[in-house]
Every structure is written in structure tokens, then in C-alpha cells.
Image (tube, rainbow, N blue to C red):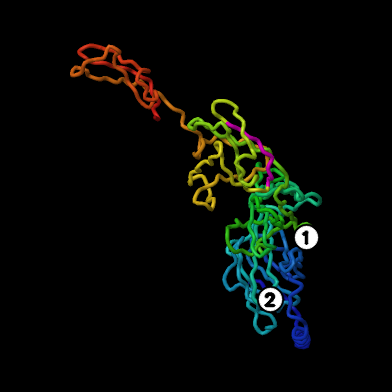
Amino acid sequence: MKTKLHNFSLLSFFAFAFLFLTVPLRAQNFVFHAEFLNNWSAGGYPFVNDINGYPSITVEATSSDDEFIIEADSYYNKWNNSGTCNFNTITPFVFYGNTPSYDPGNTFLTSSTVSGKFYTTRIKNNGYSNTSAIIMETDTAPVSFIATGAVTQLPVAQAVPINTPVQVTVNIDRPRNPQEKLYIRYTVDNWANSNTAEVVFLNTNDLAGIATIPGQAAGTQVKYYALSTVVVIQPGGIDYDLITLKQETNSGANYEYTVLAAPIGNAQITFQVNMAQQTVSAQGVFLAGSFNGFSATADSMILVGNNIYELTLSLDTTATINYKFVNGSTFESVNATCGVDDGFGGYNRVLHVPDNDSVLPFVCFNECSNCVLPGFADVTFQVNMAQQTVSAQGVFLAGSFNGFSTTADSMILVGNNIYELTLSLDTTA
């Protein structure tokens, strides 16, 4: 095991101990020493405070060795892992500061470094106490987000409608390493909770990728930023800052937008009812609803052909209306499966008024859908008159289909006292 050379006199030790006991216990100047670099025993590589509370350092390996040291302010403020440290995995580290009589030694990597590859070490700054760190391996230095226009979105921040997904475009300065993944981390409750959306690059060398933030309810404030990592982010708790290679936070302010309120305006809505199964009143057909106080006469519908009555109204797009069709003065009986309780033992139809002009589907009076079109079948009736004296006027068929007329439908003698008549009748009758 290699060790670092230090001239540490007793006087220096007491001076250090006094300083250690009188300054706030907060590590500020982390330093990285590594066997796989050229200056194992020199001044080391200072960490950069690129993420508040999570300093980092990125170095290129010059050999395939596997030992390293993390310290702060002094060699004896040292962190060590008693086992080994795996690449790309958060690892716990024990603080051994202010113990010059005890040197815990160096930390080892499970796998040796590869000369020419880059290693980003990030540590969580818990002051002079136990903490966690990670070493992330990439083929080249981690990519950076471009200086201007690194993150853009559509729809733009001032124009995101209700329940509309937002596409966030992320721009980087050069093609990614195979190990690098980019994410958008976003919150809808000011970071009490958060989720991630992976940035998708269609091609390996693309410099722009897109992530999609799901649509949100009216008035929701969404905050987000971009990050890169080698870790595959799974749902659940994770220290996002610790696993980050680079991040783009809009200079610390984050990117954000607020979902617009429901559009206020009117839409032209066309109602259609099929009266094919009804005897239409001489008064006509009407539309009654919450928009006209359920008046049975205020809004008359127009016959447009084939028993279809139609009416177009201008309605508030933020409204939900209840309504019924009216035949003369008779309100329809709305089926419960497509209605809401009207408070009087029956049901109303209901409509959440859409944002845009719309033509509603045909519905049959009293039904949830359009009327079933009638079919017809030929039905032959026969009667044996052998025990009767047949009138000179003949034999007739009377029924509901002809108003029980005794003369409308004459039957024909077909032989052996059998009279018959074939009629084409409605199969729904």
C-alpha cells in the first residue's frame, strides 16, 4: 500500500487540534488523491463545489491502479471505506478525522481503473462526519450542457394548457459517452416529491434530446432541471445530487411553468335527437336544460330530415349542463345508464361543455344511443273456414297494424276452405 508523506510535528498537531475544536465542523475543502494519478503524494486535486453540498472532481486515469484517498483541510480529516468501492454505486464512507495516531489507510476500488478513462468522484458534504460518495466511470470527460439555450420547452412556459404534456429539449456540447444518461427531474409540489423523465436521443451522435413531462391540472406549478448520470434512475428514493455528473438548473433558479386555467369562452354545441320511435306532438320538439331553467318551450328544435331534430346553442366552455329533450310538453325519460339524478326520481342527460365547437352524436328520444332502425319480414296468416258459412263479402284480417279495419285487408281462398294473406310487418312491433 502506498502512503502519503507528511511532516507533522507535535506542535503542528496541537495547533491543528486547537483549530479543529474552535472552527465550525463543516468540511469545506475536499481533496482527492489517487494511485491512478500522477501526484499521489503531492497536493492532490481539489473538489469543485458545482452542486451545493455535493462537491466533485473529475480526473483522467493515468494507470490501472485502484487506491484513493478523500480528505478535507488536513490529511487527518480523512474518509475511508472499510471494504471496497464499486464504480457507479453510492458507497458509505466513515470519517476518521483528528486521529493522527490512527491511520485507517486508503480506500480500494473493486475494479481497477482503465488508463485514459475519466472518473468523477462526488461526495455528500456532511461536515466532519460519516457520509456517502460515488465514483462514476466514463470513456471521456462528461458532456456539458451548452452555455445558451441548454433547455427549451413546448408549449412555452406561458402557454401550457390543462392536461397537456410538455416536451423539454436538452442540448449538449458534444455526443454523449455510452455510459451517460440524461434526465429531466421535475416536481409539482416544490420538491417535497419529484419524478424524472429520461431524455431520449434518437441517434448516438445527436446533440439534442427530448424528455416529456406529463400533463397536469389547471394551476399546477411545475419546476424542473436537467442532469446527467451513469446511474439508471428507478422509481423511489434516490439522492439525485450525489449521482449527478453535470446539471443544468437555469443558474440555480430551475426552469418552471404554471398550467393555464380552463379557457373561458363559448362554444357552438349542436344537439340532435331522433324521434323515429315517437309520435311527434303538433307543438314540436324542444330542448330543456340547466341553461334555460328547464323550460319546455324556450328552445325549439328544427326538423332536419329523417325524424332528426336539431338545435345549436352557444354554451360556456367552463360549464357542465344537465338537459332533456321534450316532445310537446312531455319530457323524455332518460335512462339511468347515461344520466345523472335529477332530484325528482328521474335522470337528466349531462354534458361537460367542450372547448371547441362540437356536434353531439344522435340519440333516440328516451334512449342512450341512436334509435334501432326497424326491419320488416313477410308474415303469412292462414285461417280454415270449413266449419263456417263464408260471407259473400269474403274473409278479412284485422289488427293493430291496420286499426282493426274489417275491410282493409282481404284474404284469398287458396283451396280446401283455407284463406290466407301475407303482410310485410315491422320486426320491432
Nearer to the camera, 280 or 362: 280
First in sequence: mark 2 vs mark 1: 2
Q: Is residue 211 visible?
A: no
Nearer to the camera, 64 or 234: 234
Q: Is residue 70 visible?
A: yes
Say above or below: 360 vs 98: above
Q: Of the residues shown, which amino acid type is indicated by label 1?
A: Ala
Disc sitting over residue 78 in the figure: 2
Q: Quadrant of residue 55?
A: bottom right
Disc sitting over residue 312 in the figure: none
How many numbered discs sit on the rendered protein?
2
* Crowd rating for badge 2 (residues with CA inside 10 Å; few <14, some 14–19, many 20+): many
Residue placed under numbered mark 1 in the picture: 253
Magenta span covers which residues?
309-317
Q: Of the residues shown, which amino acid type is indicated by label 2?
A: Lys
Q: Quadrant of residue 310?
A: top right
Q: Secondary structure at mark 2?
A: strand
Measured as percent of width and height from the top left, residue 7 is found at: 76, 80
Q: Main secondary structure of the magenta part?
A: strand
- At a point 68% along the width and 71% down the height, the residue shown is 69
Q: Secondary structure at mark 1?
A: loop
Measured as percent of width and height from the top left, residue 2 is found at: 66, 71
Q: Is residue 188 magenta?
A: no
Q: Is residue 314 magenta?
A: yes
